[in-house]
Image (cartoon, rainbow, N blue to C red):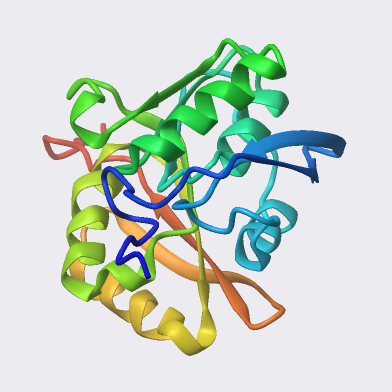
Amino acid sequence: MSSDHYFSASPASPENLRTIRVVLAGRDTEVTTAGGVFSPDRLDAGTAVLLSHTPPPPPGGHLLDLGSGWGPISLSLAMHSPRATVWAVDVNERALDLVRRNAEAHGLSNINAVTPDDVPEDVTFRSIRSNPPIRVGKNVLHGMLETWLPRLDERSDAWLVVARNLGADALQRWITASFPQGFSVHRAATARGYRVLKVRRHGSPPTEPITLV
């Protein structure tokens, strides 16, 4: 039995390409998936909850799908916002190859499927959408959020879906405690045993006192 996880950088398990049909951005869509990636046989329930309980993404700018897998969130973002640049970020090279394959098949030229290190440091995001890889462990998960949430543009939102029984409420408390300045977080939706958390980055406070005359 393979010891691969969906967060392995280079899965050693057989690729076993397959085609499935899913609904993305209101469209009946055929996509290619493979073994060694997250939820290869269906649209994961948590991802489905996220897609159905978040508003349409901004029409332009940079959008981030953190932990893209084979790409359901990235593809949806790109379909909704063809003028935006969508960054599909994952450590799993097989998953990134599937995102590229699916983007090309659907004529979505606005998706960059890359590893975390390949996102330019000066890129900030008008929205982040993620079904984060909870099973990587708390320390790795927290490190991911500490890296990417500060790259939200001001007055922009991150939307995270987490299963209630996998620590959604604890993660909400951790975000509240870890990002006290300029951020807020609340539970935006609950469905099918999942929480959708909305993390808002607010505008920066004035750098100098305001004098009223």
Q: Position of residue 76 (x, y in %)?
A: 67, 35
- Describe residue 63's horizontal placement relative to residue 75 as left or right: left
Residue 154 vertical placement versus 129 (above, below) = above
- Describe residue 134's horizontal placement relative to residue 208 as left or right: right
Residue at 41 percent across and 37 percent down: it is 94
- Describe residue 21's horizontal placement relative to residue 41 as left or right: right
Residue 50 vertical placement versus 84 (above, below) = below
Q: Position of residue 188 (x, y in %)?
A: 60, 67
Residue in the foreground of this view, choosing between 100 and 85: 100
Q: Position of residue 198 (x, y in %)?
A: 50, 60
Q: Is residue 94 visible?
A: yes
Residue at 19 percent across and 64 percent down: it is 140
Residue 147 vertical placement versus 181 (above, below) = above
User: Quick one: quadrant of the C terminus?
Assistant: top left
Choose top left, top right, bottom left or bottom right for residue 72: top right
Q: Is residue 179 visible?
A: no
Residue in the foreground of this view, choosing between 76 and 4: 4
Residue in the foreground of this view, choosing between 181 and 189: 189
User: Quick one: quadrant of the N terminus?
Assistant: bottom left
Residue at 67 percent across and 67 percent down: it is 45
Residue 194 vertical placement versus 146 (above, below) = below
